[in-house]
Amino acid sequence: MRTKLQWCAYNIQKCLDSIYLLFIFITLYFAVTSTNLNLRSNSGDEFIGIGTTWVSIVFLLIIIAIVLAFAVNQTFRTLWRRVFIQHGVLVATIMVVLALLWQLIVILQTHPAIGFDPGAIHEALTQTSSANIRSYYSYNTNNLSLLLIQHEIAKVMHNASWLMFDLVNWLLLIGTVLVNMTTVWFVDKRKLAIGLYTHAVWLMLFPMVLVPYSDIYVLPFVALLILCYVIISTTKWHIVLKLGISIIAGLTLSGIYFLKPSAMIPIIAIFVVEFLHILITRNNNQKIMLMKILVVTVFLLTAGFSYQLGNKVLQNQTYMVIQKNRTLPPIHFISMGVSGDGGYNAQDVLAMAKQPSQAAMSRYSKDKLVERLQQKGFIGYLIFLIHKQDKNTSDGTFAWLKEGRFIIDKPAKNGVKSVIQNIIYPSGHYLSDFHFIAQFWWVMCIGIISLGWRQKDRLTAVLRLAIVGGFLYLLIFEGGRSRYIIQFLPIFLLLTVFVWPQTVALIQEKLSWLNVNKKNM
């Protein structure tokens, strides 16, 4: 019989599951209805392409042909299973290698200059005396850590080119895939093939490798945090080894904080799920509880110590001279997140520059936030949040080309470079086809996650709660485009892999009537 505490914890978990389902199915709806899936003749927007071409039609025909052949042809099904399932790990590994080679070719053939924040970081690698650059880092001190990291890389490599930092991005993505696959190996080796397939398709459709910014730098850290949790919570390793992993986890969390603080959300999900699990199971084994307390203590001490060390480095750095106490306050981003589509607001940023102090910035932002909420009203704000969730999550290209001065170059006229640049550059002939195919992948990914709701275990609970936390964060703070989802991609990719069998089982159950009809014919 459950105690009141167990009953409370159980119902909290049920409530969190319901909130997750609400969010993920809303996200699926917005992904399916995205304009990226329009087979348009001419969009009139150079940043989403002049219109889809024969490429999208051929892609759709291939998908339809595969589905029909799989449904009606036993020989095709047998061949498919033999190649992609029986030899799945080998074939999927080859696909990942090909995807990485594709990304390398894209980097070597393009490596364009990027605008918005990455442009400010790149400029500061060679120019630190500019008043505009110093002002940028005075207000956006969150990017100071990344600047110092890139500065050290440039010093070691004697190279500060866009090409070099795109190659660093490439290595970071390789690291992310390797860490995620290690997580899959620890959890369920049978899912390695589907994990490799999922990551291969993602890499093929991820030109953000050309953007050396915190979105990419934080990915292997987020993946490593989940791996550390899996090792600590699921393996029977000796306590000494687990304490070593907790040290790595603490250092990883600190690294995430300095690169992109919002990507720390998975650690909150881990603590919530583990706490609820303890309350529900009421495990009174003192040895196990002591071990957990020890691991958590070492983790927190490591994270705290490394944070203090990193913060000291930032406080004492002399590479970039900034004005102290001019950092944009958190409430500025909350206020900005209630304007327009919930994204960047240039007027708000200019208003911050006019404020005499950080306290004045906070007061101005608070007044602006209250004003915007009052204008919307309760119902209006709920409608706005639904609209913002659409903007935050629906775009499967992750807002490619949708930031200020993203890429200003035009596609080349001839050669391999021309083909690649016409796929991903503004006004590219095949840019709309890229949007269409990337969106199709995103719909499939969110669809698999949504239909895998029957998968119940602590790890999937952590991943789901981390996604909910990410959604909530982007609804509260600046969002308005799906680029901010990138930091959570290791979570989405892992969840896709782990719920895949349940999704397939559910689809087979719902389509079982087809087999019945075949037998009756």
Image (tube, grey):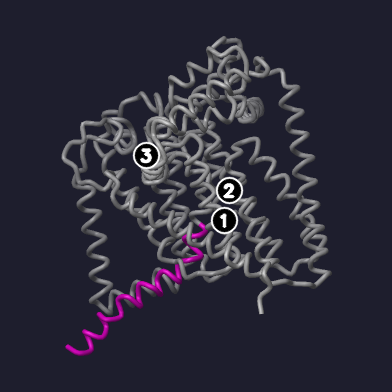
Q: Earlier in the sequence, mark 2 or mark 3?
A: 2
Q: Residue at x 39, y 30 (%)?
A: 375
Q: Are marks 2 and 3 in contact (CB under 8 Å)?
A: no
Q: Is residue 405 above or below residue 26?
A: above
Residue 11 placement: quadrant: bottom right
Mark 3 lies on residue: 380
Task: State how far apart marks 2 and 3 are (Cα).
Answer: 43 Å
- Judged from the image, the secondary structure of the residue bearing numbered disc 2 is helix
Position of the C terminus, as image quadrant, is bottom left
Pointer 1 or 2: first along the chain: 2
Q: Position of residue 46 (x, y in %)?
A: 27, 30
Tag nearer the camera, 2 or 3: 3
**Which residue is at a point 53% across and 59% down the rendered structure image?**
16
Question: On screen, 231 above or below 77?
Answer: above
- The numbered mark at residue 180 is 1
Residue 344 placed where, x, y %?
44, 28
Q: Which residues are magenta?
A: 494-521
Can you tell which quarter of the image residue 372 is in? top left
Q: Is residue 445 visible?
A: no
Main SS, magenta region, reads helix
Q: Amino acid at mark 1?
A: Asn
In front: label 3 or label 1 = 3
* Residue under label 2: 175
Decide: is 389 above or below 23. above
Say few, some or many: other residues with alpha carbon within 10 Å of mark 1 (under 14 / 14 to 19 / 20 or more): many
Query: In the rendered structure, are the residues bearing label 3 and label 1 in contact, judged by CB atoms less than 8 Å apart?
Result: no
Residue at position x 79%, y 40% from top? 305
Could you tell me how far apart the alpha carbons at marks 1 and 2 are, in whole angstroms? 9 Å
Q: Is residue 192 magenta?
A: no
